[in-house]
Image (spheres, rainbow, N blue to C red):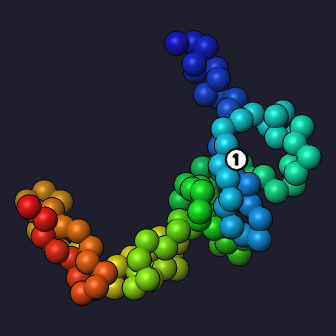
Amino acid sequence: MAIFRELHRIMARFAKIINNKVVNVIVADQAHIDTLSDKEFYMEDDGTKFNSVAKGGSYDPLRDAFISKKPYPSWVLNETTCRWEAPVAFPADGSREKDYRWNESTTSWDETI
């Protein structure tokens, strides 16, 4: 267990970013990143930015934020949280009493059974 804690402490998630697009995510230590020929394209997800890094997402340098891939065409980016939101609020009775799934063709939440 002590070895796992030590590895966890020195390993980090790094995003390979090209033209503000996250093209890959790896777990490595800084020493490994320093050996890469394209090391200038890697950025550490150090937990201080908005959101966690994910392949297929993007990096916004003005906001210093990782932004996930847009899940549906109708969703809009919340400029404060840098997260995608449905154009219709999630039903108030969802999550505990009922389950819902987004329906892009009707741009509404459908109750699931």
The amino acid at mark 1 is Phe
Q: Which residue is mark 1?
A: 14
The answer to whether 76 is drawn above or below residue 99 in the figure is below
Q: Nearer the viewer, residue 20 or 103?
A: 103
Quarter of the image that includes the C terminus: bottom left
Q: Nearer the viewer, residue 63 or 90?
A: 90
Total numbered circles: 1
Q: Which x, y percent locates residue 6?
A: 64, 20
Q: Is residue 14 left or right of residue 112?
A: right
Q: Residue furthest top?
A: 2
Q: Is residue 70 left or right of residue 55?
A: left
The answer to whether 7 is drawn above or below residue 49 in the figure is above
The answer to whether 48 is drawn above or below residue 57 in the figure is above
Res 99 quadrant in image: bottom left
Q: Which x, y percent locates residue 28?
A: 71, 35
Q: Tell me if I can see residue 83 in this picture.
A: yes
* SS of the residue under disc 1: strand
Res 105 quadrant in image: bottom left
Instruction: Look at 70% across and 29% down and name the residue there.
Output: 10
Q: Which x, y percent locates residue 29?
A: 75, 34
Instruction: Look at 91% across and 46% down and name the residue there.
Output: 37
Instruction: Look at 77% across and 71% down and name the residue there.
Output: 19
Instruction: Look at 23% across and 82% down and name the residue there.
Output: 108
Q: Nearer the viewer, residue 70 or 2?
A: 70
Q: Is residue 42 left or right of residue 49?
A: right
The answer to whether 44 is drawn above or below residue 57 in the figure is above
Q: Tell me if I can see residue 65 in this picture.
A: no
Res 106 quadrant in image: bottom left
Q: Residues within 10 Å of mark 1 (few under 14, many from 20)?
A: many
